[in-house]
Structure formats: C-alpha cells, structure tokens
Amino acid sequence: MPITPDVLSNDEKVNIINQHIRSLRFAEYNADLDLIEANAVSNPDAVSVSEINSRKTAIAARIAALDAEKAPLEEE
C-alpha cells in the first residue's frame, strides 16, 4: 500500500479513490464510444480497434487496482 499522509481519514481516502475511479469510468465510456465509431465504417481499421481495446483493458486494470486499494480502507 502506498504511503499516504496521516492527516487524511479513511473516508477521505475512499472519496479520493472514488473520484479517480469515476474519472476512469468516463475514460472507459469514451473508449466504448471510440470503438463504436471505429467499427461503424465499412472497413474498420484493425490497428485502431486493437488500440482502443488495449486502452479499455488498461483502464479496467487501473480500476481494479484502485478497488483493491480502497477495499481495506472501507473495512476499517
């Protein structure tokens, strides 16, 4: 677990993490829309589609990491 200032309560830390997760959810939805647009053309660019899917995978991994960071804070 990363070092955080002791001046933050667990609730404050959870709120900050939730803000980050919310931001990532916006990025995830934007990637979904990008994928819809990329696939809307008659000949989708396979490289673009692959890059968008990679971006979505990375976003999901970041959300999972933040959820793992948040879980013990919610238990205390």
Image: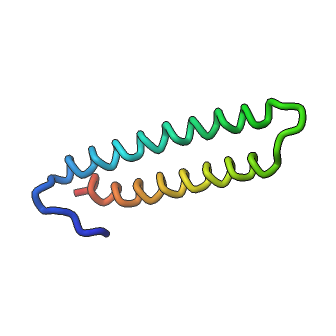
Report the front residue among 15 and 42. Answer: 42
Q: Residue at x 57, y 56 (%)?
A: 58
Q: Residue at x 69, y 52 (%)?
A: 51
Query: Is 63 displayed left or right of 15 in the figure?
Result: right
Picture mark count? 0
Q: Residue at x 27, y 56 (%)?
A: 73
Q: Quadrant of residue 6?
A: bottom left
Most distant residue in the left direction: 7
Query: Is 46 displayed left or right of 5 in the figure?
Result: right
Report the front residue among 51 and 16. Answer: 51
- Image spot of residue 19 (x, y percent): 34, 42
Q: Quadrant of residue 71?
A: bottom left
- Image spot of residue 47 (x, y percent): 78, 51
How is the rendered protein coloured?
Answer: rainbow
Most distant residue in the right direction: 42
Tell me the quadrant of the picture where the C terminus can be found. Answer: bottom left
Report the front residue among 65 and 50. Answer: 50
- Image spot of residue 42 (x, y percent): 89, 32
